[in-house]
Every structure is written in C-alpha cells, then in structure tokens.
Image (spheres, helix red, strand yellow):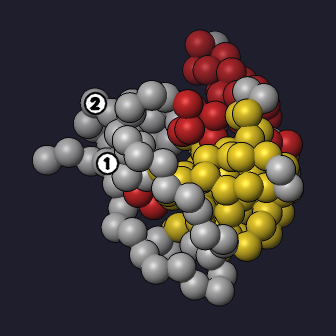
Amino acid sequence: MAQQRSRLDASAASDSRAGKYLTFVLANEEYGLEILKVREIIGSMSTTAVPGMPPYVKGVINLRGKVIPVIDLRLKFGMEGTEQTAETCIIVVDVQGNLIGVRVDQVSEVLDIHGDEIEDAPNVGVAIQNDHLLGMAKTKGRVKILLEISKVLTETGRNFAISE
C-alpha cells in the first residue's frame, strides 16, 4: 500500500512538471526550461561589462531600451567557456519579474514533455544540492536536463561547479 502511494505521489510530481519546454544545447548536453518563463530568444550580441560582477555575468545589454544582465550558463555551471558562434543565442527569461539573458551554445526546439517522460534527478551518492533541477526528461531517445531556471539564476553566490 505504501509502495503504491509512493508511486502515485511520484506520478503526481511528474505530472506537475509536464508541459512545454524550450530545449537548448550547452557543452553538447541538452537542457530544457519551461517555455512560460521564456520572453524571447535573440542572437548573441556584445555586452557591456560591469565591474565587480562574478565571471559568469558577462555584462548587460540594451534590449529595446531596457538594460538586462546576461549570464553565461556554461560559466555559471562551472564549465569551460567557449567562443561565440553563429548559433550562440541569448534566451531572455523572466525570473520573478526581472528579465535576465542566458547565453547558451544553441537553441534546439520546443518540446511538449509528458509527465511519464520525466524522472527525478538521480541520486549520485554525493551530498549535493540539486533543487535547481526539475528533473530528467527522456524524449526522442535522449535525456534532457530540465532546469528550474529561477533557482539557477537567483541563488546568490551559489556555485554549481563540482569542487574537488
């Protein structure tokens, strides 16, 4: 009985995560973020550096008269930076009423991901905080990492890099 309840609870949790996701590529891995948080996608553009910012804050851009910060998601996750290419994009997301640009390697597509295609982030046996992950989507024969983008971008000073 308890096992059935646990499965039902897990199913309900998966269903709340079902929906449309904008998928993108970062260091050859596929990620997704809820489409409702995406305001627009723009090509990469030069940023104005702001002194004193962490390295993953690339600067700010003027987007139709509004100054918004741009975060390099590779650097935020502790990955190696890369040169911009023709496919580099900035995804503008709305996080708690603030617009933030997120630089990614490439935008892929919008997917409608069903609840039964989403699993919780795996336990890797190491005490790490993974509340910035909504789950893992199994779709089109691949695994896509679903991000809770508001937690990725709003946790002050949080470093996602794996420390040794």
Query: How many discs mark residues in the rendered view?
Result: 2
Provide residue 70's location: percent of width, then percent of height: 59, 53
Residue at the left extreme of this rendering: 164
Q: Which mark is residue 114?
A: none
In percent of width and height, residue 18 lies at: 80, 42
Q: Is residue 105 visible?
A: yes
The amino acid on which the numbered mark 2 sits, given as a three-letter code, is Ala
The answer to which of 152 and 99 lies nearer the viewer is: 99
Query: Where does the N terminus fall, quadrant-wise?
Result: top right
Left or right of 54, for residue 118: right
**Residue 99 image point, x, y percent:** 74, 41
Residue farthest to the bottom, as pictured: 86
Nearer-the-camera pick, 164 or 117: 164
Classify 45 as above or below 38: below
- Position of residue 112 in the picture relative to residue 58 (left or right): right
Q: Which residue is mark 1?
A: 161
For mark 1, give the secondary structure: loop
Q: Quadrant of the rendered structure where residue 80 is?
A: bottom left
| Three-letter amino acid code of the residue under disc 1 | Ala
Residue 114 visible in the picture: no
Which residue is at a point 39% across and 33% down the rendered structure image?
158
Marks 2 & 1, CB-CB < 8 Å contact: no
Using the rendered view, name the quadrant where residue 16 is placed: top right
Foreground tag (2 vs 1): 1
Image coordinates of residue 64 in percent, x first then y, are 85, 55
The residues bearing labels 2 and 1 have C-alpha atoms spaced at a distance of 14 Å
Q: In this rendering, is residue 155 above or below 116?
A: above
Corner quadrant of residue 4: top right
Mark 1 burial class by Cα count in 10 Å: few <14, some 14-19, many 20+: few
Horizontal side of 27 relative to 100 (left or right) equals left
Label for residue 127?
A: 2
